[in-house]
Amino acid sequence: MKDKFRKLITHNKISVKYARGESDMEGKEFHPFNEIIFFLGGSGTFISDDMHLELKPDILFVIPKESYHQMCISGDKEEYHRLVLHFGDIAELEPIVKRKLTRVLATGISASLRYLLDKLLVITQAGKCDEESEAVVLAVLTLLLDELSETELVGSRDALSYKFVDYIDRNIGDRISVLDIAQEFGMSESGVAHAFRREMNISVYKYILKKRLMLAHKQILDGKNPTEAAIECGFGDYSGFYKQYRKMFGAAPSSFKNKNAEL
């Protein structure tokens, strides 16, 4: 059953939920909002552009918007439960977000941070969405992000796929192919494809496509013409870009133009 026992509170650009079971974020390895996941139980692996990490209870992940990540759950999916916060660009949080959400973080939970998370969990499970609970959510999120300034960064850049990711990032505006990556690293195309899929749980093609779409989306939100954004992000065919964009974001590129400017 998908997201069993889900409770949700939304406030302006913040949503908080407790969920057990399969995720409703499947296929959304990139998204245009910041995310905090407090992992409460289950087994599996967290995969991102920065790390592979075995999932254990009481691990906290802070995932900046527009960055790749996946929770690969093994075993009984009903044991997978977590507290999840999604938030966009919020004026009150902007100084904190810019300073601290520089990459994916994973850390053990201090007593003070655990207290804040438990408070959020109680609020969310109550499912009470009023002005008081919304104010508490915003206050706790602010304190939570501030607390994270003292946490230790945990991660690894040893996997072969991270070298591929760095190459893709440097050449994202070009028409990158698996052959290009293979030639850069002196490997076969099948070797690159298999290593990337094994370590990142996504094909090279889909990774590049979704990263390009995410970058184009950001430019369009900032006011760039969709055609220009598509070209700058490596799409040679606008009709193909348009189709994939609608599939990923649920609307035409023009409907998002200048959205950041309106905020």
Image (cartoon, rainbow, N blue to C red):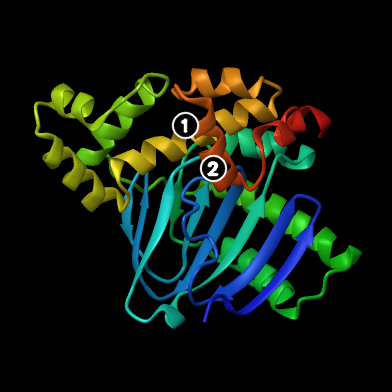
- Placement of the C terminus among the 4 image quadrants: top right
Q: In percent of the image, x 38 and y 35: which residue is there?
A: 208
Q: Which residue is mark 1?
A: 212
**Numbered disc in front, either 2 or 1:** 1
Q: Can residue 250 be seen by looking at this rendering? A: yes
Q: Amino acid at mark 1?
A: Arg
Asked which secondary structure carries label 2, the reply is: loop
Give the number of marks: 2
Question: Residue 118 appears in which quarter of the rendering?
Answer: bottom right
Q: Earlier in the sequence, mark 2 or mark 1?
A: 2
The residue lying furthest to the right in this view is 131
Asked which secondary structure carries label 1, the reply is: helix
User: As drawn, is 164 to the left or to the right of 80?
Assistant: left
Residue 162 appears at what percent x and percent y?
27, 37
Is residue 200 depicted above or below 101 in this figure? below
Q: Amino acid at mark 2?
A: Pro
Report the front residue among 195 and 79: 195
User: As drawn, is 59 to the left or to the right of 20?
Assistant: left
Q: Which residue is mark 2?
A: 64
Mark 2 vs mark 1, CA separation in Å: 17 Å
The residue lying furthest to the front in this view is 239
Q: Can residue 101 be seen by looking at this rendering? A: no
Residue 234 numbered tag: none
Q: In percent of the image, x 46 and y 68: which residue is there?
A: 58
Q: In percent of the image, x 42 and y 37: which residue is there?
A: 209
Residue 164 appears at what percent x and percent y?
26, 33
Report the front residue among 229 and 53: 229
Q: In percent of the image, x 48 and y 60: which residue is there?
A: 26
